[in-house]
Image (spheres, rainbow, N blue to C red):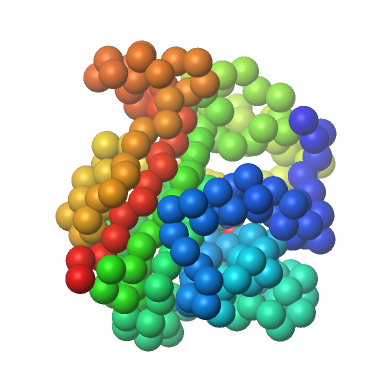
Amino acid sequence: MNDKPMTLEEQSAYEYDKAPESIGSYLQKADIQEKTVVDFGCGWGGESLWLKHHGAAKVIGIDVDEESLAQARVFSKGEVEFTSNIASIEDESVDCIFSTNVFEHVMNIPEILDHLHRILKPNGTIVSSFGPLFYSPYGCHFYWAHLYPFSHLIFGRDWLVHRIDNIRGFESNTNSWEDMGLNRITYDEFSREIQKRFDVKELNAIPVAGLPFVTKIPILKQFLTFGCEMHVSKAA
Ligand SMILES: C[S@@+](CC[C@H](N)C(=O)[O-])C[C@H]1O[C@@H](n2cnc3c(N)ncnc32)[C@H](O)[C@@H]1O
């Protein structure tokens, strides 16, 4: 485990290197050869570039973080388009949308899912997996802060901020979990929003490692669901 956050350059390279196991695994579910593909929540663009190098005709990386996009543009050297404005993408212009580790950070889920539905061609697909969800053991995401499971839920946000500020050596300027990029959505809430809009081929709760059966107990489900994997499509 790293002791400190990565630099922007390291983030792009890390994303490119992890792509075969993360976004690359989606190629078993959706063919991207000569297709227009969106990498939604592309971050530092490493996975977007990997998709362009593996057969997509056109890749559009979407992210709300302009600093990440600036780094993504440098890294991809013009091979990928990037935008922070999903509204600028034309209706029914995209064959497939891939997204890794993003939906637990998206604040306006219904509005964003409406846009993703709008830009997809009929029969177009979304393949995504994401986590950790907020209520899971490390749902605050600060892996490098050497936390105990659920410590963000047990000790709360002020305690966590104090700890990460001490490690980073500067003060966080946040007042809420949302300011920290965590929407706190549960698997069931997300799943309901998906089913309102898309045809579901696959929509699964990913259990916390080694605990697949415990997620079937309703009261424990949200605490022991690591994340979500899905493959959905827009009706023809
Ligand atoms: C954990 S990073 C994942 C980056 C990359 N997909 C990866 O797996 O390495 C989550 C990304 O989602 C982006 N994000 C959050 N809300 C978003 C939104 N509404 N639209 C697009 N991107 C968003 C964040 O800015 C951040 O870059």
Res. 4 image quadrant: top right
Q: Residue at x 21, y 59 (%)?
A: 197
Q: Nearer the viewer, residue 228 or 164?
A: 228
The residue that appears at 28% across and 49% down in the rendered structure is 201
In-image side of 167 versus 142 (left or right): right
* Visible residue check, residue 89: yes
Q: How many marks?
A: 0
* Residue nearer the viewer, 198 or 71: 198
Q: Which quarter shows the C terminus?
A: bottom left
Ligand 1 lies in which image quarter? bottom right
Residue 203 appears left or right of 31: left
Can residue 184 be seen? Answer: no
Position in image of residue 63 (x %, y %): 54, 67
Image coordinates of residue 144 in percent, x first then y, are 73, 33
Specify whether 93 is left or right of 194.
Answer: right
Quarter holding the N terminus is: top right
Q: In percent of the image, x 32 and y 44: which residue is there?
A: 202
Give the answer, above or below, for where 216 lies relative to 114: above
User: Residue 126: image x %, image y %?
Assistant: 38, 59
